[in-house]
Image: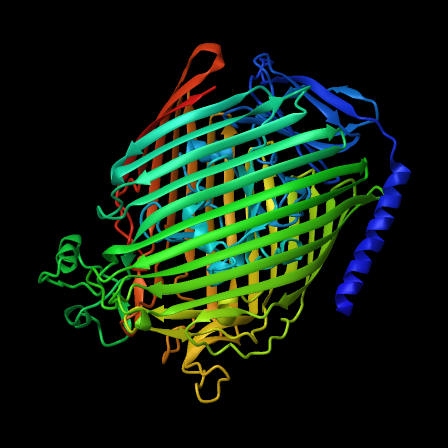
Amino acid sequence: MQMKKRIVGTIFGLSSLVFLYSALLWGQSATGVHGRVTDPDGGAVPRAMVRLYSRGGGATITTRSDENGAYRLEAVAPGEYLLEAEDQSSMLAVSEGILIWPGDDLNHNIELKIRSLRTEVLVTASSTPLPLDEVAKAADVVDGSQISRRAEFSLAEAIRNVPGVRVRQNSGPGSFTTIQSRGLRNQDTAVLIDGLRFRDAASIGGDATAFFQDMLIVNVDRIEIVRGSGASLYGTNAMGGVINVVTEQGGGKTHGEVSAEGGQLGMLRGAARIGGGIGDLDSFVYSGGITHLNVTEGVDGFDPYRNTSGQGFAKYNFTPNVSLSGRVWASGAFAALNESPTFTDAILANHPAGGVIPAIGLSDQERERFERGEPFSPGNATFIPAYNDPDNHRAASFFSGAVIFNHRLSPNSSYVISYHGVDTNRAFRDGPAGQGSFDPIFSNESLFNGRIDTIQLRTDNRIGKFNLVTVGYEFEREEHVNATTDENPDPALRPISGIELKQRSHALFVQDQIRLADGRLQIALSGRMQSFDLDTPRFTGNANPYADVSLESPPAAYTGDAAVAYFFRSTGTKLRAHIGNAYRVPSAFNRFGGFFSSFSNSFSFFGDPRLSPERSIAFDAGIDQWLFNSKLRLSSTFFYTSLQEIILFDFGVIDASTDPFGRFGGYRNGGGGLARGVEFSLSVAPASATSFNFSYTYTNSDSRTPTVPGTDFFKVLGQSDHMFTLTATQRVGRRFDVAFDLFAVSDYSQRLFGADGRFVFDGPVKADVVASYTVPVANGHQMKFYGKVENVFDNNYFEGGFNAPGIWAIGGVKFSF
């Protein structure tokens, strides 16, 4: 309680100083920026996106040029800004700093150039806008035009080719998907939506992994990926990296698009987007989109998946210095689930005695016989890949909504008050049909519902010429609800179990960004303190071992972060280094979770309310080199992460006779591991019509304890040492466009339930090709016809024993207005 009072007192004290300082600087009037957007030949560029970022923090202002290339940004407060503009293809772009004086109506023409590799502006690396050559952390941007040219429709596929990021999708569209950063675990990557955390309070890791498969591209402006510790700015789970999904803001003349596509796997998808501005010079801007995906067949003909998602943004400028914005992202999905890989005695007989098992899946034809309960020939197979379960499915939905009030007090000071609500719901239902060894006797259902409410107050203040200081407070309340039951006809034997857990936290965070040597030297120092309070959980139904537990609040988390970069303008060289520690708060499932076995009709509890937060420390250092007028960029980064303390799921260490909860296995704190390696990338944009991106990542991830019991094998399961990616795009003339991307990883080890030993899987190799042809129609509108071939080399591979799709294709049409 005393700590909370000190936190609140500190916040009020700092806020008072900020407001007093800002009031002394107040008095400047609003201004505007206008001009014309042209290409390198001086021709007008219609419908170009123009963004204005305040270097002192605050809201971003967006608009689009008209058919004559003219643009206008009104209600702009005086100050220092970063201006970014790009044409519809993103082949021509520019970013530059501008200074707007009080009362100034700035006439600023924008000449787009062949897109150099220094034009991006990033927000996630420091929570305030920075040009790429000032960013002191390893970061990448995947913008909306790149996503469109590659015809990607999911978040995971959009970032698959980012160095250091391993995307794993079990099977076809809508199947379980994970994202891992720098050789760490699924839960060590934080997901943000417009800078605000998105996570599922009811999931095992308290992270976003449970919904990656449902996060479709709807109304996304760009995706920013920052690798390395990010907990000082973004809190729990940001141990390996941060993914920030930035919503399209709209502005300018009404514009939008409607598209439809379909093809193999029984896939059909429709999407529509619209955006623009209303009122006196875009005093109100908006954007929105909706999409529906329907996969009727999937990989083996019985993997249906449906998803309907919507995403939108709106902002009203009350005055040039005061705005209120809101955004939503919602999704509802249904998926048929497969049984996990399994074995029969005949399959187990193919396993070598040495313990290292080559992963050879049963053929599709023989697997279908197994599914029907018919005799089958195992051949040389060492496992039966995931197979159909006719009455096993998942229904899920999420809603993320935020309201943000932004007040710019002066050119040097602003504050933001935001509320963010995340509601997540997952329902799993299984029945007795199918060939699974552990199918239930009666149909059962498990519900996992989460709710997180976050209120944040932050101020950004320029102190003198070289310091930008951010101070913030955050209150978060989360709720976890889990309920399980089955349809036993005898009510007396029908198990009903439920838990409701609430947790609150208070956080104080600060950051000081220092620009020296005419902006060539960038230093960022940040820190965060977060304390937690647990409510007494509420249990219903069957007996549980936690009913009489006296809860103690988890230990507070303290994090610090430092990053430095120096840019040699004469040579186009940037040196950077970043060090920081991070944490993950034990999830409600870690503390009180359990498992209902429909086979044995009983519950087992695994949680431990005494768990401490996970802790890590990470360091990376790198060099970025721009050559040939920034048309070529080389980047290399060495990274090292130590998981100092983690939460393990363990059997054999916990003794039921001495454990206060009578557990024979479950969650406990223990030693973590090490992940280190290098990231290398090469980007080339020799002409406006051509781009080429290559990356290689080497990762060495080891646990401090053997990952296969009874062996001396310490490598983290599921991790590949080597990863290669390649993306190439080429425009031919004004209308024809081709994109090619390749993803390849080396082999990896995995354990499969039901067999001893370690399976070695060949790493996935997946290449996609997209071709499109654009036809101009009346009034500047466009019709684009496109086709995409996925896994064009028809490579047969497995992700953890689940069969990925072979070669498959879709075709579509998009109308833009």
Write the residue at 44% across / 86% down: 655
Most distant residue in the bottom direction? 657
Write the residue at 15% across / 60% down: 370
Q: Say which of 444 and 759 sits in front.
A: 444
Q: Say which of 82 and 28 sits in front.
A: 28
Q: Say which of 35 and 102 sits in front.
A: 102
**Relative to 40, 369 lies left or right:** left
Whole-percent x and y of residue 308?
A: 40, 39
Whole-percent x and y of residue 497?
A: 41, 68
Is 1 above or below relative to 232?
Answer: below
Q: Say which of 388 and 671 sits in front.
A: 388
Is 484 above or below relative to 258?
Answer: below
Q: Is residue 411 visible?
A: yes
Whole-percent x and y of residue 803?
A: 27, 53
Residue 239 image-quadrant placement:
bottom right
Residue 148 image-quadrant placement:
top left
Name the quarter where the N terminus is drawn: bottom right
